[in-house]
Amino acid sequence: MVKLSEDLSRLLEEVKRELRPTEEEVKKGFDLFNEIKTLIESSLSISYDYTISLEGSFAKGTSIRGDIDLDVFILIRKEDLSNEWVEEHVIKQLLVSQLSKYPLQLKYASHPYITLRAEGFEIDIVPAYWARDPREITTAVDRTPFHTRYVNSRLNDYMRDEVRLLKKFLKSLGIYGAEVKVEGFSGYLTELIILKYGSFIDALKAMSGWREGEVVIVDEKLRSEYLTLRELRKLFRDDVLIVPDPVDPRRNVASAVSDRALKIAVIASNTFIKKPSRTLFFYKPLMKSLSELIKFLDETERSVLLLRYLIPKTLPPDVLWGELKRVGRRVVSLLENYGFNVIDYDFWSNELNQAIIALDLTHRGRLSRYDVRPGPSKISRGLLNFIGKHSSSNRTLSVWIARDGVPKAIIKRKYENAQELLSSLNAKELSAKDVIFSNIISELAEIPEGLVKDEDFMIWLTSFIMKKHPYI
């Protein structure tokens, strides 16, 4: 374990005190769980054995003060438990039960579940298969109770504080959460990292040296009983971080972690080790006015295009963000094929009715009227085709063999303006199945007032344009 300086030790102890849930929060959380458990038991009538359990961070004692969620699982001893059966025989009953004294909302991830808010807590009620053994697991949610048991059997109170430090650190960086929107570190992965390294600082020391394809073995039994490092890298070849699940070793707990999230974690770990600061736990993001953002873009000779989308209210968040990212990649590829330099792109949504894809372009989103294209440098059929194609095109200004022997053509561009190119496409080409293209906002001054007044949107837009981050 790394020996801490007095200043660092004092800083971490101070942050730990601020992150621990209050006694009142803990009592309220357990009281709410017991109330909801009673309401479910008095309302749910199915012909299968079931039990109600508390899972997730609160059950493991790793929740952060003021940010506590309850995960209430209804574990049902029914094989072939389908989403359709759950919705028909469980969800429908609960939506009209005594639980409805709280505002209930049906949501979907890979499974249907109910979410509600009560006394400042967000509570998810999740039906799942009641597996008695990890070998019976069929879905991700079936695995959750085994995760809770595994962590609780190994974490002590000191380590729970360390988990909270790491969670808050990752939250501040914007890379906490395994959902498609974030593509970062799940709560369970964070807990396993502390189980592996023992403390927050020791975890950062390790993370500061991680590379793509890093393998972290939490339970050393897995090394001898299951897969070698080579086999793990082959099994999870597309993942940038590999952490075999001690509960189910052929599953990678870190599969959601993106290349971007891994890089941020590595850089931020190095930053904190060199210069520890409260800022990396409690970063307050910037929010600039539109006029300031417009001035900043003008000074840097950039242009930001905002593609606005309409979304259905019932669209599951993972589906929404997945579709936005696919459309975003497609649009960027199209722009780059026409010669535009997209230096960055990102996404925003209120997850209710609208979403945005933002494109950050150099040279104010414009190109010169003509483009110089090189051809094949070797004498070949390709060289002759290049000369023939461009010499007969009415968009070619000239075609020749340059002094260095490379054939070149000066061609009039079809599109000199990125907005013009995107506007030439029909809505379907800019849409996905559930994410429907609405319009292009080409000037920040044209952003609707409703969005300008949305603090979450303006914080996101400020970050996208100014690119100021706490880890650098």
Image (cartoon, rainbow, N blue to C red):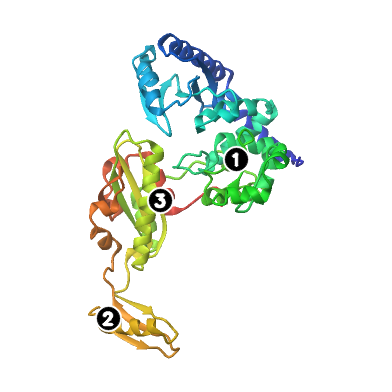
Q: Is residue 269 visible?
A: yes
Residue 141: % across, % down: 50, 30
Give the alpha-carbon distance from disc 1 to disc 3, as whole Å: 32 Å
Q: How many residues crowd mark 2 within 10 Å: few (<14), some (14–19), many (20+)?
A: some
What's the residue at 43%, 13% (across, down)? 47
342 over 274 or under it: above or below: below
Residue 396's disc is 2
The residue that mark 3 highlights is 346
Furthest-top residue in view?
42
Residue 242: % across, % down: 61, 46
The residue that mark 1 highlights is 250
437 on left or right of 466: left
388 over 339 or under it: above or below: below
Q: Quadrant of residue 27?
A: top right
Q: Nearer the viewer, residue 459 or 111?
A: 111
Residue 125: % across, % down: 45, 22
Sequence-wise first label, 2 or 3: 3
* Element on which disc 2 rests: strand
